[in-house]
Image: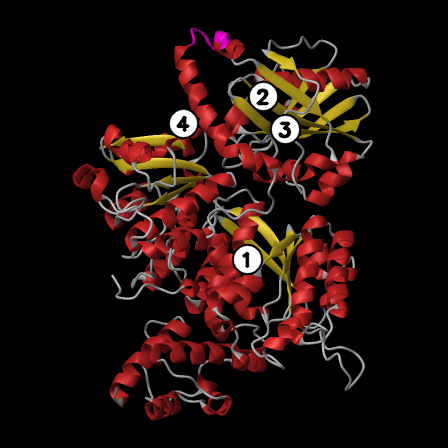
Amino acid sequence: MDKGEIRTTLERVFQDVFDNETFTFSDDLDREQLKSWDSLGHIRLISTAEEAFSVQFTLDEIAELTTAGLFVECIARKL
Amino acid sequence: MSAKSAPFRDLPWLPRLSPDFRDRLRALVSQPGNDWDLQLRQLAGQAFGVNQAIALASALERLRGSGGKPRSLVPFRLGLVSDSTTDFVKPLLIASALRYGIALEIIGANFGQLMQEAIDPASGINASKPDAILIARDPRALPLRAAGGADWPAYDAEAAIAEIAALRAGFRRNCGATCLVQTIPAPASLLFGSLDAATAGTLRGAIASLNARLQQDVPREGDVLIDVEWLAQRVGLEEWYDERHWYLSRLGCAQQMLPIYADFVVRTIAALRGKSRKCLVLDLDNTLWGGVIGDDGLEGISLDPGDAKGEAFRAVQTAAADLRRRGIVLAVCSKNEDATARLPFRSHPGMVLKETDIAVFLANWEDKATNLERIARSLDIGVDALVLLDDNPVEREQVRQALPQVAVPELGADPSSYASTLLAAGYFESVAFTSEDLARAEQYRSNADRVQALEGARSLDDFLRSLQMEIHFAPFRLDNRKRITQLINKTNQFNVTTRRYTEQQVAALESSPEHFTLQVSLRDKFGDNGMIAVVICAKRGAEWDIDSWLMSCRVLNRRVEQAICNRIVAEARRAGARKLIGSYIPTERNGLVRDLFQGLGFVADEAGATPEGSMRWLLDVEQFEPLEVFFTESAVAAAEPATA
């Protein structure tokens, strides 16, 4: 899976978690910008992404994944 | 169809999430029709995940505000006492409850203040007067570590046992609601290894002792167990626990476990509200046996022990036979010639089920929805009490569309999963098991026989006389307490006020001088109907107020209600009362008894009528002439006392 495909799948993950079908994926998206990306939203994002890509994040990674772009990089390393 | 069937934790008996789930939900919220509650229930009937559950729960909240009264949803207020963060659990429980027709309202406890919540009479949960309280404790938050520093034992169950008992006692004292108490899953890790299981002082040993005590104490004291220990074993401890979720957000299980966990909990709530299914309807070809009896003949169908496919189909039959043994009624609905369909029951040595196990046997060429309605009618139960087990996806879909109230489990391509899928779905969840349950399947069959007898009788009175009915009245008593509570909480149709009472409240009524109570059982020449009616009257000097009156619909049109009325009046007269007050509070399901009091000679009290349709009726005790009935009164209870 290349990074483009990762972004496509992640877009669906974000749409699902934040209940927003018009959401368009951008690497720059930051936790600070999205109100519903709070601590519980983050846990759901982690779990939903783990299921979608069949990967598992470590506690360190979970703490560091604060932008959409970091998700892409981290998942690309695991696949 | 997917290549691999869904695992247990993904609720494989439910239809998969449809691709347009979000769109349909959004459309429903923005433009709710009159039947928005039915549409929402249908969406909740799919196998949703955590994200969809949150959307469903918030849709329910918004629609209750804007869409009008949810007519098909029964409200239920649940106190939630949990060591886990409840932000995830709450929406999952609310969304799963929709599946069972329940609008759940959840009152949470403050984090880390579970005991205060129980012992303070003014706490949020106690003050809210909940219908039940879920006690969802986690092994990591219970005081399972032994006191005594670095010495052995490392773990001990006593403090945890005492803590859960204190929670239950607090709630019982301060709000009287039934506690739903979770058992505790085994630990993911062992200290010694296999030795843990047999060694006192290990965590595994302490949790096992704790569960053993819960299994003993909780049902005995009128509360209800939720067997999360089994649930965790069923999905596998490897999947159940995700330590990261506990460390990050105090969630006691992996997030992916929440959909099955919530469904598992809500089944018990549905059972408390009498919403469990009563009848299993079986398709025949490729469901009860392999192959098509009409094409393959007796020798051609697979049903032989020793043959793998035959064993799989025999397992389906064994599951059905076991359900029948515990009181679930069995019916057959098959597209077949009647004689052909009955052939294996009569002549195949591999059959586990017998023809006499089947209360209603319909083999014809009409569509299944019509036949299912017919089955419900002849058993005198609602269509929403039926489960249809059918291997054919087209039939399943047709029934789901025509009769969405019928539960229709998805089945995979392999019959070896049929029995476990049927049993995993929790359609027949129950909170008590009484001798009435043991006899029920037989009672329904004799009821079908009674319908036959009716067709042969000249008049209804002649028919009733020919039934040789014996009726028995008794006040509430300990030996039937569980059955009385069960009837009070699951009777929906013949129920004038639909007031629900917990086992503790029923116990209190047994000795209350302010109340007159009545349990009624009935026997006739076809068999024992067991306890079939319950009455509670509040005595207020010269006035007796009928607080509750409910009856099993199995004995409708037998003049039981007339006999009960005669009895209440006689007792009221003996106690010096002059007036009997009857109330009718309408619900979605009790239209049947709207005119009950009028039919018995009560007079409407206009002052007691409300715009919601409630009505008040009065009867002059002294003027009352006993109504004609056809019973002999038996001296002993028709049914054996409830089993423990």
Evaluate whether residue B449 shows in this view. yes
Kindly report the distance in space between the C-alpha atoms of the residues bearing marks 1 and 3: 32 Å
Q: Chain letter of disc 2?
A: B
Mark pair 4, 2: CA separation: 20 Å
Residue B264 picture location, percent across and down:
51, 58
Disc 1 and disc 3 on one polypeptide chain: yes
Q: Which mark is residue A21?
A: none
Q: Quadrant of residue A23?
A: bottom left
Q: Distance from label 3 to label 2 (Cα)?
A: 9 Å
Given the image, on which type of amino acid does mark 4 rest? Ser
* Residue type pointed to by label 3: Ala
- Amino acid at pointer 2: Arg
When the figure is inspected, residue B159 is found, relative to residue B431, above or below; the finding is below
**x 27%, y 57%: residue:** B413
Q: Secondary structure at mark 1?
A: helix
For label 4, the residue is B378
Q: Looking at the picture, which amino acid does disc 1 mark?
A: Val
Indicate the quadrant containing the N terminus of chain B: top left, top right, bottom left or bottom right: bottom left
Which type of secondary structure does the marked residue at label 3 adopt? loop
**Same chain assignment for discs 1 and 2:** yes
Q: Is residue B147 left or right of residue B330?
A: right
